[in-house]
Amino acid sequence: MHYETLFQEIHRELQLIGEIGQVADYIPELAYVNPDQFGVHLTTVGGEEFAFGDAEKRFSIQSIAKVFTFVLAYSRVKSTIWERTGLEPAGTPFNSLIQLEYDKGIPRNPLINAGAIVICDILASELASPKENILSFIRRITGNQSIDYNSKVALSEKKTGYRNYALVNLMKSFGNIKNDIDKVMEIYFHICSIEMSCKELSQSFLFLANNGIVPYSGERILSVSRTKRVNALMQTCGFYDEAGEFTFKVGLPGKSGVGGGIVAVHPEKYAIAVWSPRLNKKGNSYKGMLFLEEFTTKTRSSIF
């Protein structure tokens, strides 16, 4: 498969639709991002790599990091994790308070804001140094020790995180947050500030395409069964309240972030990451969604 030629072809097609959407400027630091950047990187389970555009430029991965923290928590507390969070699509915006109150402080799934905050609370209890341990895990699965937090983005998130503080306080009132709120939110804001490139993201998600094993190191991160469940969760809940649309049009499990990144996994084949900072109204990369739809259509590589 001539992936790089195909990447160029799809990108040319996307150029014809114009620049639609805007960056996530409600996080002040993200307002400075050049909205016209675009990158894609695909890594196969066998180790082949294919890239186009700004594939090695790092950006704020935002909610994509929720997959990493969920995997860490799931590998430790296992099935008891579902006592703290559900596994259903939310059907409401990623930072909605309405459903959370209706469900008495139990988030619909661990990939929306409230669910990821609960996961950070679990990791605050389980890990000796949560921020350092999370970063160490990501560096380990990519084999890249230079991946880091962006302190300016983390501070920017904290200063404007009123709704996220509302979420954590509401869950605390229902007894679903066990640790000090400031400790939990310090972890949450930092994971959202992690910077990675498309290349690093595709490499980091490759264990989810390889039955839970990091191909380059042979390290098992999750059992085959739990890997299947993480992929299923991404398929149904990985795109806020646009997960059904992504499943319908792209047909791969994946996760998006308001930094404009999307990672998708084809089990036993590859992981692909795309980055385009302009977002649609649901908070997903406008061109990233279109690119992956065209990619799986042209390659006939949907899992369905």
Image: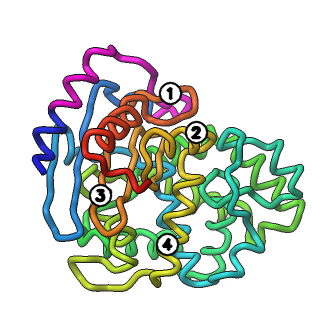
Magenta span of residues? 9-29
Residue in the picture at 33% in, 15% down: 17
Q: Position of residue 180 (x, y in %)?
A: 74, 67
The foreground one among 47 and 73 is: 47
Residue 170 visible at all: yes
Q: Is residue 164 left or right of residue 286?
A: right
Q: Position of residue 4 (x, y in %)?
A: 12, 43
Residue beneath label 3, please?
Answer: 202
10 Å neighbourhood of mark 4: few (<14), some, or many (≥20)? some
Which residue is labeled 2 in the image?
242
Q: Is residue 183 left or right of residue 37?
A: right
What's the CA distance linking mark 4 and mark 1? Answer: 29 Å
The reply, left or right, for residue 45 in relation to residue 192 is left
Crowding near the residue tagged with mark 2, few <14, some 14–19, many ≥20 C-alpha atoms within 10 Å: many
Do callouts 2 and 1 mark residues in contact (Cβ within 8 Å)?
Answer: yes
Of callouts 4 and 3, the N-terminal one: 3
The residue under label 1 is 280
Dot 2: element: helix
Which residue position is annotated with label 4? Answer: 228
Q: Does 51 sit left or right of 202 as displayed?
A: left
Q: Which residue is depicted at the point 62% across and 66% down?
A: 120
Instruction: Please report whichever mark, 4 or 1, sits nearer to the chain's N-terminal start.
Output: 4
Q: Quadrant of the C terminus?
A: bottom left
Q: Residues within 10 Å of mark 3 (few under 14, many from 20)?
A: many
The correct choice, above or below, for 121 with respect to 63 in the image is: below
Kindly report which numbered mark, 2 or 1, lies closer to the viewer in this rendering: 2
